[in-house]
Amino acid sequence: MLDLQTVNDVLRRATESNSDAVLMAQEGPSSWSPVSSSDLYGRVRALADVLEQWGVGKGDRVALLSENRWEWLVTDFAALAIGGVDVPLYPTLTPEQIGYMLRDSGAKVAVVSTAEQYQKLSQAGELPDLEHVIVMDPGHNEGAESFANLMKDAKAKQGRDAAFDDRLKAVRPEDLSTLIYTSGTTGEPKGVMLTHGNFASNLNYSTEGLGLNSKDSSISFLPLSHVTARHLDYALLCHGVTLAYCVKFDQLPEAMKTIRPTIFVAVPRVYEKIRQAVEGRSAHSPVKSRILSWALGVGKAHQPETLTGKTPGGLGWRLASKLVFTKIREAFGGRVHLFISGGAPLGMDTAGWFADAGIRIFEGYGLTETSPVIALNRPDAHRIGTVGQPLPNVECRIASDGELEVKGPSIFPGYWRKDKETKEAFTDDGFFKTGDIGNLDQEGFLSITDRKKELLKTSGGKFIAPQPIENKLKANTLVGQAAMVGDKHKFACVLISPNFQALKAWAKTQGVATEDHAELVKDSKVVKAYKEIVDRVNQGLANFESIKRITIVQDEWSVETEEMTPSMKLKRRVIEKKYASQIAAFYRDEATSKG
């Protein structure tokens, strides 16, 4: 077990390693530069000194608006080193959203990645507390400081400095480390306060039994503004794992080939996309399709061995592995030995498909408010379909209405300047109410059914958990996203956002001439195909939860268009508002419909 007291201990461990490559900085899709432990120490010292000269001290907020890159980590560590509080902001946020969070947090300094992000600040309205802005990219940005200029003394500051190390030690576990604004799926964003002790207590237990070491490498591509990615990078740095920062998500496939990581951590949507790509390539060739189906059948017969960490034997398995499974592993770079999923429910369909392909994915679970890990599957304690056993320092219980409640040193102290919301988030005896419906089995494995607020209650009083059904739909290559509706109605319906890349390829094989999204989703062959997908899913559902009507929308939902959170969860309120007329059409004859 690690023995961390603060996040500054992570920096200490990483910079005492004498590693030639703590980080890999991305210069291009396949071009990377190493950042050694002494480089990291010198750069953090240089920026921390600048922040102190500007009057940034204990408790002052430093905002970070950037994609994943080495400058992000340096800014994070520099702010925390002097007792500051960083405020990570998603680079996809609008100027209005950024303005709200900068004003609410009272940030004195903002560090942004590009001229485009800097421009957002000028469009964000009055920012009375903001005194300094730093831009990472080279170039002249009037009124802003150049990150490169602030690094001019970094090389001279690579040697250990007693005064700086004392500053690191002066920060206490109870000190605030960060404000992370919730993604706002259900209203106004709230600033989640996490202390150094919250992070440290979680890090001390979350990687136990995973076997991480300095021979490992991992690509950091999940947004560092999300607690999962940040916690992960801290954890990997503690164990000497080399981190490669991938700036743009569309460069990930090339990064996989170049870095060939040994550890892969992603949200479920990434795994779903890889699965869809594999199935999509096979769909256009009857021979490849039969080979894939046969191989997965062989894998399913050996799934129990895969799920216990064994490599199956036998001629059938070896042939299936050579023809299919090794190619699937190559999509991850070919060397990954540890696959982890978090941020949203993985779903049994996706987990089972990869297990059939010989890949065991360790699903975990947590929230921003819990720093984040509550539970995680591990090599020595793994159960597919669950999120694993809770960490030893987290106490879990299930309330009478099925909601999971948790308590422990990694649970946040409250929401920034929101006493009412903080009080509402906890029970009278101090348990945090997660908002998730959960179940603990006899061996302590935790299962999460759905978000409490997202359960659909039919007018007949039946509860429907939408996420498992939506995940079954997304298992099909043609489905990008799916959102069930039906709360307070007689029956459930679904809005489907297609995987348009796969749909266009499929449509060509069916003689559908158009590639226009609006025309595609109305084509009779396309509509028939999606109805058949829904019908197949309905076969495994109870009558009250089966989907009665569908609408295929012409939009591909994304973070940028605001239907998805950065961790790829549905923003149901946004979707329900955007497609209010289509939803109303589902139920226009409800009074007379038999469902």
Image: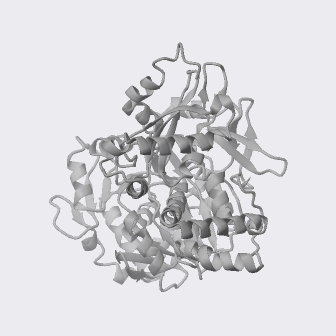
Q: Residue at x 54, y 80 (%)?
A: 16
Above or below, 541 against 164 in this view is above
Query: Residue 91 appears at what percent x and percent y?
Result: 35, 54
Q: Is residue 3 visible?
A: no
The answer to whether 496 appears left or right of 141 in the picture is right
Q: Position of residue 129 (x, y in %)?
A: 29, 45
| Quadrant of the rendered image containing residue 430 | top right
Kindly identify the residue that appears in the image at 61 percent across and 44 percent down: 536
* 445 vs 169, nearest the viewer: 445
Give the vertical position of 318 relative to 458 (above or below).
Answer: below
Q: Residue furthest top?
A: 591
Q: Residue at x 31, y 78 (%)?
A: 153
Q: Nearer the viewer, residue 349 or 323?
A: 323
Q: Position of residue 496 (x, y in %)?
A: 46, 41
Which residue is rendered at x = 14% and y = 60% of the image?
142
Residue furthest out toward the right: 442
Q: Residue furthest front?
A: 511
Q: Is residue 299 above or below residue 335?
A: above
Viewer-proximal residue, 151 or 281? 281
Give how far across and how far down residue 533 sits, in percent.
Answer: 55, 45
